[in-house]
Image (tube, grey):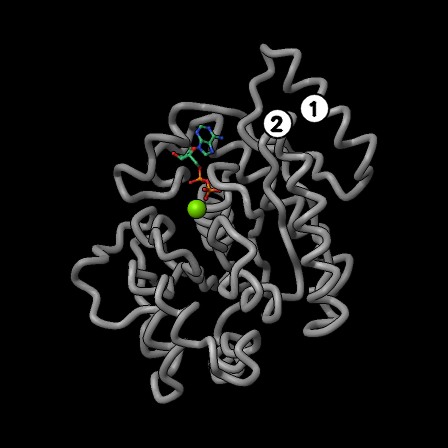
Amino acid sequence: MITIAVCNQKGGCGKTTTSVNLSSCLASKGYKILLVDMDPQSHASLGVGIDIYKIERSMYNVLINQEIKLEEIICKTEVAGLDIAPATLSLSGVEIDLVNTIGREGVFKGCVNTLPPKYDFMIIDCPPSLSLLTVNALTAAQELLIPLQMQYYPMEGMKQLFKTVDIVTKRLNSNLNILGILPTLYDGRTNLCKDVLSGIKGYFKEKVFETIINDTIKLAEAPSAGKPINIYDAKSKGTEDYFKLTDEVLGRVRQKYGA
Ligand SMILES: Nc1ncnc2c1ncn2[C@@H]1O[C@H](COP(=O)(O)OP(=O)(O)O)[C@@H](O)[C@H]1O
Ligand SMILES: [Mg+2]
């Protein structure tokens, strides 16, 4: 199983949109996917049609109670091959509940280790912060995918993110690798987007995915139906963009893991 954390502490840059749609596109190609909702806002769970008010146990229970196994909270989705470990608002309590736990950064990794080997990929949707939940995701992951909104200010936040990644790599998880930086919410009509894109390509070079996720209304609409984009509108530009990303992710992963 290859674990990819989708992470950027900035809110609204397309983490959840990317986690849900990359997961769904991978599943539709025949891979077995576990999407992990690591955000108390529960947007990834809602985005795949989970009724978060009806579930009894979620990521919160797994992280604070070692007796509840990750496998026990997993729900199926309407996409064949795509399962989710859902979150509810209670997940926000984890930061406080784990404050005195020794090795608290590695709690989620411990949970993942109990999972039966039935998934090809685990995709973790991180919260918009560099909190304990994010550090738990980075500690359990091999690969990091960073969605980056094509605006000027988010570049500043990248320095902070890389500092955190550096600390995690040195102290907690030496296997962590940056799979790629994904330009999101791209509007080709604006010079700002074009300038920012050429700026980040100049700076991060081949770490930037060739795929660009365009700003399109269908991608914003799909969560309201609780469906990934390839189910909501299979012919949309958003579906095309996320399948392109899926192929690029598979290419990068195969090169490294030979899978
Ligand atoms: N490519 C896109 N085109 C249009 N809307 C998008 C796109 N990506 C994300 N959105 C919308 O922007 C908002 C923030 O995206 P989201 O994926 O939830 O970001 P994050 O998880 O980083 O906070 C959501 O309302 C989402 O539907
Ligand atoms: Mg989100």
Q: Residues within 10 Å of mark 2 (few under 14, many from 20)?
A: many
Quarter of the picture holding the N terminus: bottom right
Measuring from the top left, give residue 138's x and y in whole percent. 61, 64
Measuring from the top left, give residue 98's x and y in whole percent. 44, 76
- State the residue position of label 2: 150
- Disc sitting over residue 180 in the figure: none
Can residue 2 be seen in this snapshot? Answer: no
Measuring from the top left, give residue 213's x and y in whole percent. 56, 31
| Residue type marked 1 | Val
Quarter of the picture holding the C terminus: bottom right
Query: Is label 1 in contact with label 2 (beta carbons under 8 Å)?
Result: yes
Measuring from the top left, give residue 4's x and y in whole percent. 59, 59
N-terminal label among 1 and 2: 2
Q: Residue at x 50, y 24 (%)?
A: 215
Query: From the viewer's perspective, is residue 139 above or below residue 10?
Result: below
Report whether 104 appears left or right of 248. Answer: left
Q: Nearer the viewer, residue 218 or 175?
A: 175
- Disc sitting over residue 196 in the figure: 1
Query: From the viewer's perspective, is residue 77 above or below residue 191?
Result: below
Q: Residue at x 54, y 60 (%)?
A: 134
Q: Residue at x 70, y 24 (%)?
A: 196
Q: Nearer the viewer, residue 134 or 143?
A: 134
Report whether 37 appears left or right of 224. Answer: right
| Residue type marked 2 | Met
- Image quarter of residue 210: top right
